Amino acid sequence: MNRAYFLIGTDTEVGKTLAACALLHAATAQGMRTLGMKPVAAGGSEDVDALITASSVAAPRECVNPYLLREPLAPHIAARRDGVAIDIARIARCFGELRGLADFLVVEGVGGFRVPLDESRDSADLAVWLGLPVILVVGLRLGCINHTLLTAEAVRARGLRLAGWIANQVDAKMACVEENIAALRARLDAPLLGSVPHLTAPDAARVAGMLTLPED
């Protein structure tokens, strides 16, 4: 059965692309045809390149990444400065094309869950439009419990299912890592798909072995 997920983070720079690529590697190892999608990228194509490399099947780049914005800014600002309007319907059409090519598809969001895409819509609206279960990447650092619970609450408020979450230690010096993970496990109505320690050289293929795929 075709499986697709919308992957979000508690904030920017929490390891969304690393987690997305690791999930693709894990699904490929189980014999699935895999594809990653990055609807909006701002400030460079590195994340898009990583997703393409981690995918097991090829797809048109303009569908994998419909919008590549020049500056590393909030998408609505970067798009305005590029003279571009982000069209959710266009993203949905690209998603439909990709879904027909793969058994396992990860759509990586941009920034956090409520990052604006234009003057009236944000990343949460895109998630609702696509209607996908959500995977949340939690950047383990001071304040992550609050950020995580607020994000999970926002996901539920939009009528979406939280299919699982990944704990990624972005702060090498964070105190009480296991206690923070335990607090989140007790409060989130979703499975922990894996815990990733702080890595000086992140490797998606290695991280894949630390994760389990969400239940269909």
Image (cartoon, helix red, strand yellow):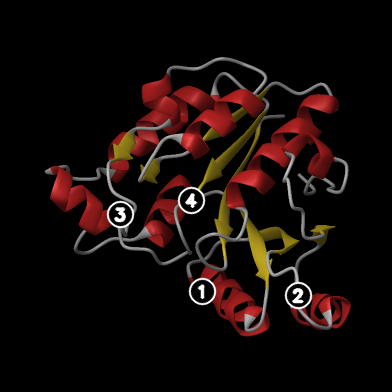
Above or below, 185 relative to 196: below
Q: Residues within 10 Å of mark 4 (few under 14, many from 20)?
A: many
Q: Which mark is residue 173?
A: 2
Of the two numbered discs 1 and 4 in the rendering, the one whose residue sits closer to the viewer: 4
| Real-space Cα separation, disc 4 to disc 2, in angstroms | 27 Å
Q: Secondary structure at mark 4?
A: loop
- Sooner in the amino-acid sequence: mark 4 or mark 2: 4
Name which quarter of the figure residue 123 lies in.
bottom left
Q: Please tell me whether mark 3 sits on a helix, a strand or a loop.
A: helix
Q: What residue does disc 3 label?
A: 75
Q: Amino acid at mark 1?
A: Ala
The quarter of the rendered structure image containing the C terminus is top right
| Amino acid type at mark 4 | Gly
Please determine whether, in this image, residue 17 is positioned above or below residue 143: above
Residue wearing tag 4: 109
Q: CA distance from mark 1 to mark 4?
A: 15 Å
Residue at image coords 65%, 67%: 139
User: Residue pushed farthest left?
Assistant: 83
